[in-house]
Amino acid sequence: MCCDIIFRLKGILEFACQLDNPNGAQSQGTISKSFQGLQSKVSSKNIVLTVCNSPVLIWPNTGFQSNVESLTEASSCGDILQYIELDYSGSKKSSKKKDKKKSGPTVVNMKLLFEVTEPAGNEAPSLIRVSTQQHCVKMPLPLDCVLSVTTDESLTTVCTGLVEALNKQLADMEEVVLRYRKGSSFLVPQPFHFQLPEPAGFTTVIYPAGVPDSQLQDAREDLHKRFKLPSDRPYLRRANAFHFPDAAYKDGYLRNPHIHLNPPNIEDAKLYLVQGVYSYHHYMQDRVDDDGWGCAYRSLQTICSWFQQQGYVETAVPTHTQIQQALVDVGDKEPRFVGSRQWIGSIEVQAVLNQLLGVTSKIMFVSQGSELTTKGRELANHFQTEGTPVMIGGGVLAHTILGVAWSENTGQIRFLILDPHYTGGEDLQTITDKGWCGWKGPEFWDQNAYYNLCLPQRPKTI
């Protein structure tokens, strides 16, 4: 599905219920009744949708009503963009066009509000005394709904779709609360959004807070069957959640700088690229001065970030010290190696991946750099089937290969290189313009040096 705009609606509702007997058979009905009350609330005329960074308010359940006269039920959803004052960086929009093009659809963030005043009735208040002991359960429900549309879709359709999404999300949250509760102990249901292969597309899944992915295997298996997803790789772990283009990564690392490059001009060539998301790790990051000795460590960190962000592992990207300790633990190095500035190579990278992540790797050996031009088919097959970044070490240098452009007919090849020797800040334009992430020809390699390539393999798991 072609998507121009993602409407994202967020809000907090308070779930509350009184349980006479938390372990009794009637408690499930009481919980369901409380959720039905919340569904009635989001379907009422009191619901208001506010568009973030704009003056726009919309009442979706009153036949479409807005505080902006020009926005009517006949307006297309693209018309709302002119009222949004802030761009993705949080600064005022400029009339000048930015050099850097924004990737992905436009995100319109909205908040869920309710009118709190209602016409007063003539009824007198009544008091009821409850003499039985009850358990009062209260918890916040973090609602987070998305709707992907084209710009010509009507605002009325968008608002109707968002209200329907709210009701469905509350129903899904009820199911999760009932499944994982223990007496009066409830786990907060949390929504996660996933961009799945077509025809599933954008999908929201509710997981219970505090339950790790390792304990949600059965739930994922059911979802894989429902959406007809392959059973050999993760799609629905928390780390696989969709990253909205208007949201910054909190750790400060650049993700996938290669997507901003133009492909090389090779006749009859096909692109074979890394699949998924990785972080760019390079010299001088994390307050570690490893200039001149840490290139293979940084390439390894990039590979580890790939396995983390594809949901294969939940552990953090290892530090230099942790990498060195892992090599000591497997008997590859002496204890004095920890804290040193000694180089590592492809064989050590293979050992650390196995020790820390449980990931196996294949080693490809070439006796001289000129032979790398003959490895097009093997590298293309790796990126097609495994899709993991490849660490290559030769002489005194290490690099990360993110893909190849290769012609099966002519044998011509270009290598997509992520260079860990970069020592500057996280400046995407500098990194791409100066070739720190870029396409390289066969002459990039030392023609007489031998090289080892570490090709990590995907674990077969969901």
Image (tube, rainbow, N blue to C red):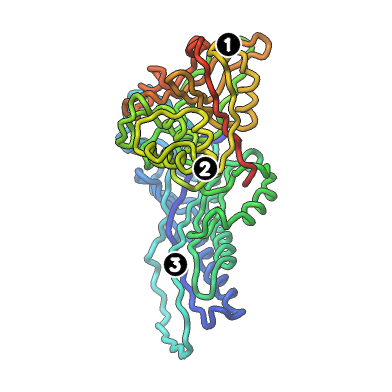
Residue drawn at 33 percent across, 23 percent down: 96
* Residue 363 x %, y %: 58, 28
Label 3 sits on residue: 139
* Residue 314 x %, y %: 49, 48
Cα distance in 3D space between marks 3 and 1: 58 Å
* Nearer to us in this view, 365 or 455: 365
Residue 154 showing in the rendered view:
no
Quarter where residue 265 is shown: top right
Label 1 sits on residue: 266
- Name the element at disc 3: strand
- Amino acid type of the residue tagged 2 in the rendering: Gln
Disc 3 packing (10 Å; few <14; some 14–19; many ≥20): some
- Name the element at disc 1: loop
* Residue 369 x %, y %: 53, 13
* Nearer to us in this view, 363 or 127: 363
Mark identifier at residue 355 = 2
- Amino acid type of the residue tagged 3 in the rendering: Met
Disc 1 packing (10 Å; few <14; some 14–19; many ≥20): some
Residue 300 showing in the rendered view:
yes
**Answer yes or no: do the residues labelled 3 and 1 have beta carbons within 8 Å?**
no
- Amino acid type of the residue tagged 1 in the rendering: Ile
* Residue 323 x %, y %: 43, 39
Residue drawn at 65 percent across, 19 percent down: 377
Cα distance in 3D space between marks 2 and 3: 41 Å
- Name the element at disc 2: helix
**Answer yes or no: do the residues labelled 2 and 3 have beta carbons within 8 Å?**
no
Compared with 45, 204 (above or below) is above
In the rendered structure, the answer to whether residue 198 lies left or right of residue 208 reads: right
In the rendered structure, the answer to whether residue 325 lies left or right of residue 33 reads: left
* Nearer to us in this view, 18 or 196: 196
Check the picture and name the quadrant holding the N terminus.
top right
N-terminal-most mark, 2 or 1: 1
